[in-house]
Image (tube, coloured by chain):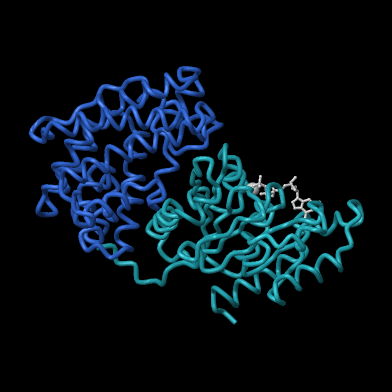
Amino acid sequence: MADAAALLLALQFADSAFPAGGFAFSWGLEGLVADGLVTDADDVADVVAQQLTLRWQSMDRVLLVRAHAANDAATQVAVDRLAEAVTFSAPMRAGSRRAGRALLGVCARLGLPAATAYQALAADDARLGHLAVVQGIVYRAAGMTCPMAELVSGWSLISGFSSAAVRLGVIGHVEALRITTALRAALADLLAAPARPAELPASFTPLADIAVMRNHRRDLRMFAT
Amino acid sequence: MSAVSTRPAARVGIGGPVGSGKTALVERLIPALMRRGVDLAVITNDLVTAEDAERVRRSGLIDPARVAAVEAGACPHTVIREDPTLNIEAAAALERQFPGVELILLESGGDNLASTFSRDLTDFWMFVIDVAGGDDIPRKRGPGVIRSDLLVVNKVDLAPYVGVDLPRMLAEARAVRGGRPVLTTNCRTGEGVDAIVQQLEREVLFRQ
Ligand SMILES: Nc1nc2c(ncn2[C@@H]2O[C@H](COP(=O)(O)OP(=O)(O)OP(=O)(O)O)[C@@H](O)[C@H]2O)c(=O)[nH]1
Ligand SMILES: [Mg+2]
């Protein structure tokens, strides 16, 4: 078995009960449901698979790996600036920063010095704090290797989407399990190949991006994105 | 560095079942606290709409920029108890934006008797029930009723119309709370609101 301490660390941070505000974000799913573009389990599975391959793999993972490797504040900030630049819409940027700052905040309270230091920087600069970047910083500070940090980040995306889908009433708990089981395999495939941090982070999930933009202005909504 | 030399604002939670009068109480507390010179901000945890946040922003009682809305992702319990991080961040953002803010009122989304606030989020929290919900509510000993720092029984004006024996309801409430504070309000008229303000001044603003 892999090192139990390392696995337990990953389980703790990947737990949906980890208190970093993740439950309040649907990353476009709520809007897609409201617009009738996601109506059943197959649709949810498609959306999450696309988010995993066309967003997480090519963008979040790249940012996370760069942030995890950063040895000084200037490099961390540069990765964060890049995250800001490559995140398409304003509501998506705002959501990513809110989620990142929540994770940063709880890790600072936990006493991780790297989190406290970066939180102080972010307090004075409203454009800092993107989720993937903060994940890279705090997962490293908590003691995760980079591959483990990638795994936790990818899994958080999958479980966050399926949980949001359940609360949106599009799928039941067993369908959620089926979806997370299938995507667990998809994530494992992605993780089997090394990350490519040298590439420019990029995503292509236009429907979900538009859904986030539209949702932002909707009167009826339960999620932050 | 953000050099905020003032002490952190007191966080005061307001929870309670749907429609018990939480926003009505916020609307009464804002002017009452402001009259006493308290520097205020408000956070609402609306469930499906930003209705309460908008209602407070449009009330004309407070600078709309001082009212923040935090989404609960359909989890009103979670956002004030198991995972209050988004509310904690919203409160910190208000403090940064309005240095000198002394008190932040946090209205929970309408919930049920089991809802309680995390001590990491609030310094003091009250639970608002109303007489029209039935005089058996205190007897049911929900964690909100039992553990809140202050139980507010609102809509006392309605007692005669819903067949509620108010003195008995209050006696039972005090009994299940082991004598800890229970106050009554009529948020339509503002009756009883001063007593809550005095409690807040004593317990969280340390003015008395
Ligand atoms: N008669 C009477 N009505 C009241 C009183 N307080 C509030 N109401 C009314 O009760 C209704 C609900 O009040 P709100 O303040 O919106 O209740 P709430 O607890 O904020 O509701 P949610 O946020 O939706 O859970 C409104 O129609 C109020 O006008 C009161 O003391 N007496
Ligand atoms: Mg309300």
Residue at the location (32% across, 44% down)? A97
Answer with left or right where residue A29 lies relative to residue A50.
right
Instruction: State the residue in front, A148 or B56.
Output: A148
Up-down: is B159 above or below A58? below
- Colour in which the image shows chain A: blue
* Residue under the point 34% across and 67% down: B4
**What residue appears at the point 11 percent right and 34 percent down from the top-left corner?**
A194
Quarter of the image with the C terminus of chain B is bottom right
Residue extending furthest toward the front: A1
- Residue B124 left/right relative to A177: right
Residue A91 picture location, percent across and down: 37, 34
Q: Position of residue A222 (x, y in %)?
A: 52, 37
- If the image is split into quadrants, where does the N terminus of chain B sit? bottom left
Where A80 falls versus A36 (above or below)? Answer: below
* Number of marks: 0
In front of the other: B89 or A64: A64
**What residue sits 29% from the left and 66% below the top?**
B3
B181 vs B64, nearest the viewer: B181
Chain B colour as displayed: cyan
Q: Position of residue B19 (x, y in %)?
A: 71, 47
Percent coordinates x, y for residue A164 in the rendering = 45, 35
Compared across the picture, whether B105 is left or right of A100 comes to right
